Image (cartoon, rainbow, N blue to C red):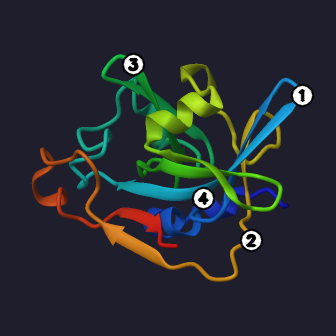
Amino acid sequence: MSIINKSFYNQNTLKVAQDLLGCFLVRKKGKKIIRVRITETEAYRGFDDLASHASKGKTERNELMFGEAGRTYIYLIYGMHWMLNIVTEEKDFPSAVLIRGADFLDEKGEIVKKLDGPAKLTKFFGITGKLNGIDITQKEIIWVEKGNLKRKKIQKSKRVGVDYAKHSKDWEWNFRLDY
């Protein structure tokens, strides 16, 4: 399957979040290749999005969100769970897509394991802050390949755990494959 290039990520975050559904997140660990189908994403976009780390401006923690599209933005929550995001849109407009869920498939395409939740996904993949800032358009450590779903139905809902985000808490920026 072909790797997704930088121009894919350098577009509207809501579009990228939906288009990533059905694509394959791939991780190389030594000689082993692990591939999962992305089933859930969440969009965080711009300064007006109070659920976004970038809503209060650039900091050392969120600096990557202001950078080049197609890079990983990985951070630790609750002192124990790593979150994998992919930076989107143009430089200096802070946006990213959180990868929330995926399916690990066998050779026949049957689901072997559901990775429901971003912490389960990063743990399964061995993703830590050491992978923060990686260019995922290069086929080296972690990358995304085009999906092979003929049709996909997408469910939209409110983002998870952002009740503090005032006007943006009700935005339906959580996207899931419905199958």
Q: Residues within 10 Å of mark 4 (few under 14, many from 20)?
A: many
Task: Identify the residue at horizontal 35%, vertical 34% (top origin).
Answer: 58
Q: Disc 4 or 1, which lies upstream in sequence?
A: 4
Q: Which residue is mark 4?
A: 9
Mark 2 or mark 4, earlier in chain: 4
Residue bearing the label numbered 1: 31
Question: How far apart are the alpha carbons under marks 2 and 4?
Answer: 18 Å
Give coordinates of residue 116: x percent, y percent.
46, 47
Q: CA distance from mark 4 to mark 1?
A: 27 Å
The residue under label 3 is which amino acid type? Met
Identified by mark 2, the residue type is Asn
Asked whether the residues under the numbered discs 2 and 3 touch, taking CB atoms below 8 Å apart as contact, a structural biologist would say no
| Picture residue at 57% right of the left edge, 78% below the top | 152
Disc 1 to disc 2, how far (Cα)?
A: 24 Å
Q: Give the camera-side residue of 132 and 107.
A: 107
Which badge, 1 or 2, comes first in the chain's sequence? 1
